[in-house]
């Protein structure tokens, strides 16, 4: 059968991060990516990525989960039955994740396989994932410049302004004085016409988030992302009731079942599935359908490498509920350098690639360059 999965490979790619990337909970010292490659009998390869930014040993865990837990379940499977295979993986492995107390790593591993299956199936069909799936609804989309802060904010904001970005996102959770100064710097540099988003990365208690509301309103922050430690929906609902803030969340919600309560809550205005975390394109498409049914906007979380970048663009190409895409403006050797002719934003908008599979071809020499030995 030409669509069966003939072989699989998992490798770790890593590059040192030099430009001071930090979230409220930790600095990011390396760009890391676990890449799954699935090959069919004709030699076509589909690729997908598992999110492994934190902790720094996550790639080692992900290799074991994929090699020992996920990939053996693909034996004999028809690669064209993407949704069925993904459902099989979730059914078999999600209970283990619950028992382990680590649903995230399990869904992140499944995400890589699911995207690789979509890529492989679309390549066999000779079209992009968007054209194979729900159908292309747009050819370009707005992007926002992500990852300003906690240092060098004014300089990076000026670069984003000069490159034509019309929206930027600032990292918060570094103390009120630093957060306030960084938001003020972005407004001073970018002016009133640029949308400003903010991301606390779950860095605040509920009371700290409530106390931050006047600062966020003063600087015209359009949404606050993951404002409360633990990201529990009752806390988000209390925050919304007390402050009326526009709340975005979802990057650390795993599977469509857990997403439903967030999508259904009036406290959550922006839904943020991450294709490399929540269960892949199959799960993200389901979340977008849920969000569309409730009139919610989807702004997919995206802070990884080339495969997650391209998969997110394919989601944006076929889902009307996606309103904007996150664009990491920091140096990332595991995104553009891995691709032939990677798409770049122009004046805050990005053309959505329409080539086979994920839409853009990988540079195999670059993949080899950044792959760790023996992975």
Image (tube, helix red, strand yellow):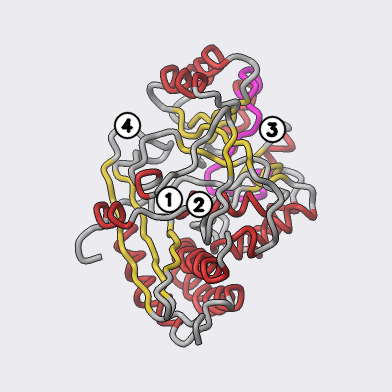
Crowd tier of the residue under label 1, counting other residues whose Cα lies within 10 Å: few below 14, some 14–19, many 20 or above: many
The circle drawn on residue 19 is 4
Residue 216 placed where, x, y %?
61, 24
How far is the residue under mark 4 from the one under mark 3? Answer: 31 Å
Farthest residue to the top: give it.
188
CB atoms of marks 1 and 2 within 8 Å: yes
Query: Mark 2: few, some, or many residues within 10 Å (few <14, many ≥20)?
Result: many
The numbered mark at residue 245 is 3
State the residue position of label 2: 310
Residue 218 part of the magenta segment: yes
> Element type at marker 2?
helix
Residue 61's mark?
A: none
**Which numbered disc, 1 or 3, marks the residue closer to the eye?**
1
Between marks 2 and 4 in the image, the one whose residue lies nearer the viewer? 2
* Residue 313: % across, % down: 57, 49
Which of the pair 44/373 is nearer the observer?
A: 44
Of tags 4 and 1, the one toward the viewer is 1
Q: Label 1, on which residue?
A: 306
Q: 291 left or right of 154?
A: right
């Amino acid at each position: 059968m030409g669509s069966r999965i003939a072989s699989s490979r998992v490798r770790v790619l890593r590059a040192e991060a030099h430009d001071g990337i930090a979230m409220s909970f930790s600095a990011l010292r390396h760009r890391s990516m676990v890449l799954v490659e699935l090959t069919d009998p004709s030699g076509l390869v589909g690729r997908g990525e598992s999110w492994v930014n934190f902790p720094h040993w996550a790639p080692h865990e992900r290799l074991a989960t994929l090699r020992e837990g996920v990939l053996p379940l693909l034996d004999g499977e028809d690669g064209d039955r993407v949704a069925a295979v993904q459902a099989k993986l979730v059914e078999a492995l999600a209970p283990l994740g619950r028992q382990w107390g680590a649903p995230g790593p399990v869904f992140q591993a499944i995400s890589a396989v699911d995207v690789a299956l979509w890529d492989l199936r679309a390549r066999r069909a000779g079209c992009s994932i968007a054209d194979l799936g729900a159908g292309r609804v747009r050819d370009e989309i707005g992007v926002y410049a992500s990852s300003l802060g906690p240092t060098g904010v004014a300089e990076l904001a000026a670069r984003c302004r000069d490159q034509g970005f019309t929206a930027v996102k600032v990292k918060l959770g570094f103390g009120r004085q630093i957060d306030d100064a960084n938001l003020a710097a972005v407004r001073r540099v970018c002016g009133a016409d640029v949308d400003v988003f903010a991301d606390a990365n779950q860095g605040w208690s509920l009371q700290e988030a409530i106390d931050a509301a006047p600062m966020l309103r003063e600087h015209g922050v359009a949404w606050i992302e993951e404002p409360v430690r633990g990201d529990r929906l009752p806390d988000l609902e209390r925050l919304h009731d007390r402050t009326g803030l526009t709340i975005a969340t979802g990057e650390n919600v795993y599977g469509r079942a857990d997403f439903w309560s967030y999508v259904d809550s009036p406290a959550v205005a922006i839904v943020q599935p991450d294709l490399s975390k929540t269960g892949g394109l199959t799960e993200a498409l389901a979340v977008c359908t849920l969000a569309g049914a409730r009139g919610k906007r989807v702004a997919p979380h995206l802070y990884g490498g080339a495969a997650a970048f391209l998969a997110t663009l394919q989601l944006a190409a076929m889902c009307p509920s996606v309103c904007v895409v996150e664009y990491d403006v920091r140096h990332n050797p595991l995104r553009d350098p891995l691709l032939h002719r990677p798409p770049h934003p122009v004046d805050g908008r990005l053309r959505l690639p329409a080539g086979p599979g994920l839409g853009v071809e990988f540079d195999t020499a670059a993949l080899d360059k950044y792959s760790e030995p023996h992975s």
